[in-house]
Image (cartoon, rainbow, N blue to C red):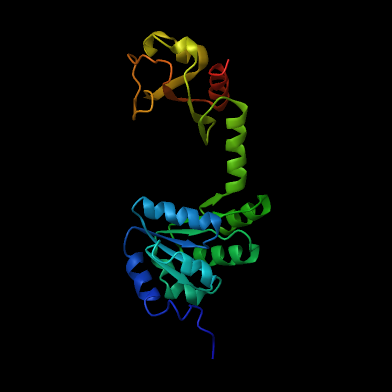
C-alpha cells in the first residue's frame, strides 16, 4: 500500500481547509524554512490567508496557530499537492532553498498545474536559471538581493534603499544641508542632482507627500527617487 503523502496529524482537516482557502484570495507557501516562514508570517500579518506546507513535522507544529493553515506533506509528490488543492491557488510560493532537487521537482509540478502567479526562491545563479527555464514567473534570490541592498546602504548615508528594473531607485535619507530652510520648488533639486523628493517625515512623525512648497528642517527624513547613480550621489551629500 502506498504511503499517504500527507501527515496523519494534519490529514483530517488539512485537505478540506486547503480547498476552502484556494477559493479565496490566499497564498500557498511551500517550504517553511527561514525564507518561507518569514514570508508566510508577513503575509498573515498583512491580512492574507496562507496555507503553509512543509515536510518537517517540528516546523509545522511550531507554526500551528500562526498561519491560517499549516500542513505536513511531501511537496515533491503531485498527489500530495493535489490533495491540498495547490492547483487551485492563484498564487504559490516555493520557498525551498537547501534541497535543490526538492525545489526543482516542486516548482516543476506547480508549473504543470498552470498556477497563474508562481514565485520561487533560488540559492544561486544556476538554480535561478533552471527555475526560469521551467517557467517560474518570479525567481528571487534573497541572499543576493540583500547583499546588493546592504552594499548601497554601506556605501552612502542611506537609511533604506530599494531599486527597480530600469535603473530606478528610491532612498531614505536625512536631507543635505543645501536643501534646508527653503521650499523644495526653489532648490533646483532635480536639475542639479537628478532626483525628486517624493515624501518627507518631520522628526519622528508620519510620512507625508512632499510638494514644491515643502520646507525641510534638521531632523527631517526624506524619500528621494531617481536613477541608481543619482540617488547614490545624492545620499553622499547627506553625510558631507
**Seen in the image, is 103 located left or right of residue 211?**
right
Classify 187 as above or below 122.
Answer: above
The answer to whether residue 205 is above or below residue 179 is below
Q: How many marks?
A: 0
- Name the residue: 34% across, 16% down: 214
From this viewpoint, which residue is outermost toward the bottom? Answer: 1
Q: Position of residue 210 (x, y in %)?
A: 35, 22
Q: Nearer the viewer, residue 2 or 221?
A: 221
Q: Quadrant of the C terminus?
A: top right
The answer to which image quadrant residue 100 occupies is bottom right
| Residue 163: x %, y % from top left | 52, 34
Between residue 64 and residue 156, name the one nearer to us: 64
Where does residue 235 sit, x and y in percent of width and height? 54, 22
Quadrant where the N terminus sits is bottom right
Q: In which quadrant of the rendered view does residue 34 lie?
A: bottom right
Residue under the image location 55 percent in, 62 percent down: 107
Q: Nearer the viewer, residue 6 or 83?
A: 6
- Give the image location of residue 87, x and y in percent: 43, 67
Image quarter of residue 3: bottom right
Residue at the image position 61 percent from the left and 30 percent from the top = 154
Amino acid at each position: 500500500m502506498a504511503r499517504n503523502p500527507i501527515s496523519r496529524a494534519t490529514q483530517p482537516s488539512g485537505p478540506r481547509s486547503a480547498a476552502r482557502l484556494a477559493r479565496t484570495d490566499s497564498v500557498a507557501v511551500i517550504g517553511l524554512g527561514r525564507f518561507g516562514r518569514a514570508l508566510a508570517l508577513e503575509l498573515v500579518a498583512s491580512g492574507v490567508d496562507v496555507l503553509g506546507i512543509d515536510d518537517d513535522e517540528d516546523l509545522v507544529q511550531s507554526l500551528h496557530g500562526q498561519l491560517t493553515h499549516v500542513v505536513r506533506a511531501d511537496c515533491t509528490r503531485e498527489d500530495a499537492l493535489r490533495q491540498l488543492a495547490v492547483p487551485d491557488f492563484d498564487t504559490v510560493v516555493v520557498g525551498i532553498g537547501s534541497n535543490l532537487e526538492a525545489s526543482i521537482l516542486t516548482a516543476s509540478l506547480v508549473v504543470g498545474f498552470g498556477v497563474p502567479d508562481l514565485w520561487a526562491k533560488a540559492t544561486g545563479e544556476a538554480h535561478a536559471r533552471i527555475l526560469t527555464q521551467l517557467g517560474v514567473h518570479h525567481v528571487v534570490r534573497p541572499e543576493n538581493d540583500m547583499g546588493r541592498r546592504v552594499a548601497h546602504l554601506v556605501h552612502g548615508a542611506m537609511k533604506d534603499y530599494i531599486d527597480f528594473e530600469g535603473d530606478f531607485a528610491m532612498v531614505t535619507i536625512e536631507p543635505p544641508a543645501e536643501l534646508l530652510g527653503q521650499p523644495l520648488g526653489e532648490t533646483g533639486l532635480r536639475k542639479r542632482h537628478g532626483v525628486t523628493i517624493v515624501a518627507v517625515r518631520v522628526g519622528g512623525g508620519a510620512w507625508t507627500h512632499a510638494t514644491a512648497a515643502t520646507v525641510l528642517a534638521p531632523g527631517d527624513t526624506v524619500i528621494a527617487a531617481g536613477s541608481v547613480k543619482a540617488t547614490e550621489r545624492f545620499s553622499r551629500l547627506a553625510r558631507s
